[in-house]
């Protein structure tokens, strides 16, 4: 686990006059296990992450690492609608951690149930409401709310399995589906439609197709989506969704 100072725009751009490089601080290892994913809690005071077998927290103030408990280590974790951190607990359930109880409480196991299938799914988040999305092994999409639980099937992705997911500030869900010829899709909660956006293509410098199942997908908050391909020549990609007109 390493930490470093945030480089705000425009100082993290390549300028002709250059900029200083702040050193990274090594905080240490977490149970000598690989770290799979981590998110900041709702208070922005600590980082909550998972390794291949444990859940841990890191204080932003002093960098202290605390191992909270044992959890299955796969997929992504996410901030839910009621300030909990949730992650997949086997094929049928989610575990949940109340952030304000992290110092004296283990994560709740099997918080809710729905047969999600054999794939290690990603939880897609990004919208301010805290609504999360996931999919089953046939490509059916579901939303999850801490108070209401899982929804009925919302729609069907073009292919299966469904890979990483991300939600933009207007509530639209973007993700990838398919293993050998992965396609991008969009679910619009206002219309209830799932749109096939096709294969990712970059034409900068040279034409490049992104056809492998994508490893990660994230929404930084400024309108763009960042995703990384799972390939021997893996790249980071930027995608700017079309801005939709607002209706009263």
Image: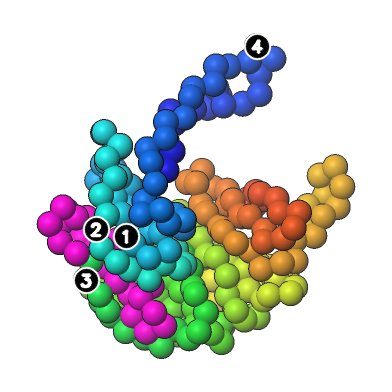
Numbered mark located on residue 42 in the image: none
- Coloring basis for residues: rainbow
In the rendered view, does 128 fall on the left or right side of 195?
left
Of tags 3 and 2, the one toward the viewer is 2
Residue corresponding to mark 2: 68
Number of residues whose C-alpha sits closer than 10 Å to that of mark 3, classed few (under 14), some (14–19) or many (20 or more): few
Q: Earlier in the sequence, mark 3 or mark 4?
A: 4
- Asked whether disc 2 touches disc 4, contact meaning CB atoms under 8 Å apart, the reply is no
**Range of magenta residues:** 85-106
Residue corresponding to mark 4: 17
Numbered mark located on residue 108 in the image: 3
Residue 73: x %, y % from top left: 41, 67
Specify whether residue 242 is painted magenta. Answer: no
Residue found 56% across the figure and 59% down from its top: 216
In the rendered view, does 51 fall on the left or right side of 172?
left
**Structural distance between the alpha carbons of marks 3 and 2:** 11 Å
Q: Nearer the viewer, residue 44 or 248?
A: 44
Residue corresponding to mark 1: 55
Residue reaching furthest to the left: 104
- Indicate the quadrant containing the C terminus: top left, top right, bottom left or bottom right: bottom left
Residue 234: x %, y % from top left: 71, 54
**Structural distance between the alpha carbons of marks 1 and 4:** 43 Å
Number of residues whose C-alpha sits closer than 10 Å to that of mark 1, classed few (under 14), some (14–19) or many (20 or more): many
């Amino acid at each position: 686990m390493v930490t470093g100072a945030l480089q705000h725009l425009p100082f993290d751009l390549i300028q002709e006059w250059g900029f200083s490089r702040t050193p990274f601080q090594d905080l240490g290892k977490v149970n000598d296990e690989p770290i799979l994913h981590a998110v900041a809690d709702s208070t922005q005071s600590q980082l909550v992450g998972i390794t291949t077998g444990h859940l841990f927290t890191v204080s932003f103030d002093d960098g202290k690492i605390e191992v909270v408990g044992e959890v299955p280590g796969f997929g992504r974790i996410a901030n839910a609608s009621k300030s909990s951190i949730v992650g997949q607990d086997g094929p049928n359930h989610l575990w949940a951690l109340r952030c304000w109880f992290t110092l004296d409480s283990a994560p709740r196991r099997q918080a809710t149930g729905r047969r999600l299938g054999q794939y290690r799914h990603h939880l897609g988040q990004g919208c301010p409401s805290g609504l999360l999305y996931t999919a089953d092994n046939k490509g059916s999409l579901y939303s999850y709310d801490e108070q209401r639980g899982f929804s009925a099937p919302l729609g069907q992705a073009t292919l299966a399995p469904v890979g990483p997911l991300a939600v933009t500030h207007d509530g639209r869900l973007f993700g990838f589906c398919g293993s050998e010829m992965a396609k991008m899709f969009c679910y619009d909660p206002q219309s209830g439609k799932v749109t096939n956006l096709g294969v990712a293509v970059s034409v900068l410098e040279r034409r490049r197709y992104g056809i492998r199942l994508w490893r990660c997908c994230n929404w930084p908050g400024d309108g763009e989506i960042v995703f990384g391909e799972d390939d021997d020549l893996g790249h980071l990609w930027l995608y700017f969704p079309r801005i939709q007109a607002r209706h009263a």
